[in-house]
Each structure stands twice: as structure tokens, then as C-alpha cells.
Image (cartoon, rainbow, N blue to C red):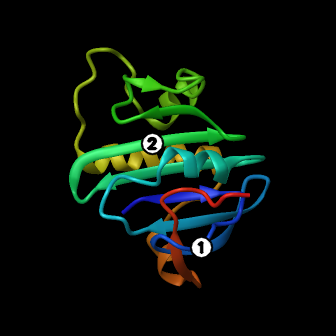
């Protein structure tokens, strides 16, 4: 299930989602659980969502070993990856030191560590960027605002 943490508001209409406010680094963040059956929100939406702020996205593909990570800052994709050694974006290596600190192996010969390890590492990286620790208790106890996340951002 994809989730996004953002310091901006979520627009209505689109695919089902639940969102709630959670304290994190630099103030309140919005955590969105996006139920789309795919692998996250469209790039144009994330560019708009992160304008003037930050969006950190982790998504999985229905239990398959696809775990994507995206870091947008002020409307730009800074770092994105499926596997930690194949990063892209405008600053693909900007998070390397943080990635190593949380446990990623960035060597070219790094093998697949397993679905749960990969997910834990991506969540740890997201926590370092947002100050938000996603726990079972946090997700269970939150008061969700339910709605839809559009496939594309609304026109201004």
C-alpha cells in the first residue's frame, strides 16, 4: 500500500485514500495511505504536492518485491529508486550517507536482502527525511480523513 508524507494539503477526487496529520521534522506533516493497487501517485501530482515543501513516497506493488522510494523537494524529484544501487533524480546521490546510516548496502555487488528488510530500510530512510516514524500504533490510532487522491494535480 503506497503512502506519502507531505507538508502540503491533499487535493480531492481520484483513487481512495486516508490521510491524517502527524508531527514530524519542522512541523506537521500529512501522511496519506493511498489505495491504488499500483505503485504510487503520478509524478506530475507529486511535483505539485511538493511545491514549496517536501514529499517522501514509499510504495509497494501488491506484495510483489517492488518497493519504490521517491523524494521530491520543491516540485523536483531529487532521489528515486527501486533498488538502492540504481538511483535517479536530480540529486541521485544526495541521500547516500543517510542511506548507509540506516543500513542500505550501496555497493554494486549488493544482493537482494528480502522484502521485509527492504521495506524496513525504506521506512527508516523516510523517517530520517520527515521525522515521522510509521508504526502499527500510529496507523491504528490515527483519525483519518477519507477521500480520493487524483491521478493528476488540479489546474490552478
Residue at the spot 52% in from the left edge and 67% down from the top edge:
149
Quadrant in the picture for the C terminus: bottom right
Circle 2 Cα neighbour tier, 10 Å, few/some/many (<14 / 14–19 / ≥20):
many
Disc 1 on helix, strand or loop? Answer: loop
Q: Nearer the viewer, residue 8 or 114?
A: 8
Label 2 near label 1: C-beta < 8 Å?
Answer: no
Which label is found at residue 12?
1
What is the x, y in percent for residue 132? 61, 58
* Among the two numbered marks 1 and 2 on one chain, the one whose residue lies closer to the N terminus: 1
Q: State the residue in front, 33 or 112.
A: 33
x and y percent of residue 50 in the render?
Answer: 67, 48
Q: CA distance from mark 1 to mark 2?
A: 23 Å
Q: Nearer the viewer, mark 1 or mark 2?
A: 1
| Residue identified by numbered label 2 | 69
Give me the residue at 73% from left, 53% from top.
25
Regarding mark 2 in the picture, which secondary structure is present there? strand
Total marks placed: 2
63 sits left or right of 20 in the view: left
- Is 25 or 3 nearer to us in this picture? 3
Where does residue 17 sit, x and y in percent of width and height?
Answer: 48, 73
When the figure is inspected, residue 84 is found, relative to residue 33, above or below; the finding is: above
Res 53 visible: yes
Can residue 138 be seen here? The reply is no
Mark 1 neighbour class, 10 Å CA radius: few under 14, some 14 to 19, many 20 or more: some
Q: Position of residue 44 (x, y in %)?
A: 55, 46
Q: Could you tell me which residue is drawn at 53 percent across and 56 percent down? A: 152
The extreme front residue here reads: 155
Please report the residue visible at 64 percent of the width from the left and 66 percent of the height from the top. 10
Specify the quadrant that holds the N terminus.
Answer: bottom left
Amino acid at each position: 500500500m503506497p503512502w506519502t508524507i507531505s507538508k502540503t494539503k491533499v487535493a480531492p477526487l481520484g483513487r481512495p485514500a486516508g490521510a491524517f496529520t502527524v508531527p514530524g521534522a519542522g512541523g506537521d506533516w500529512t501522511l496519506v495511505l493511498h489505495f491504488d493497487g499500483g505503485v504510487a501517485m503520478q509524478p506530475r501530482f507529486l511535483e505539485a504536492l511538493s511545491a514549496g515543501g517536501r514529499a517522501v513516497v514509499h510504495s509497494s506493488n501488491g506484495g510483489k518485491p517492488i518497493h519504490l522510494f521517491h523524494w521530491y523537494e520543491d516540485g523536483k524529484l531529487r532521489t528515486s529508486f527501486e533498488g538502492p544501487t540504481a538511483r535517479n533524480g536530480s540529486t541521485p546521490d544526495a541521500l547516500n550517507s543517510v542511506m548507509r546510516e540506516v543500513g542500505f548496502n550501496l555497493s554494486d555487488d549488493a544482493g537482494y536482502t528480502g522484502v521485509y528488510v527492504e521495506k524496513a530500510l525504506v521506512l527508516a530512510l523516510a523517517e530520517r527525511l520527515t521525522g515521522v516514524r510509521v508504526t502499527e500504533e500510529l496507523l491504528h490510532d490515527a483519525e483519518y480523513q477519507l477521500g480520493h487522491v487524483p491521478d493528476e494535480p488540479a489546474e490552478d
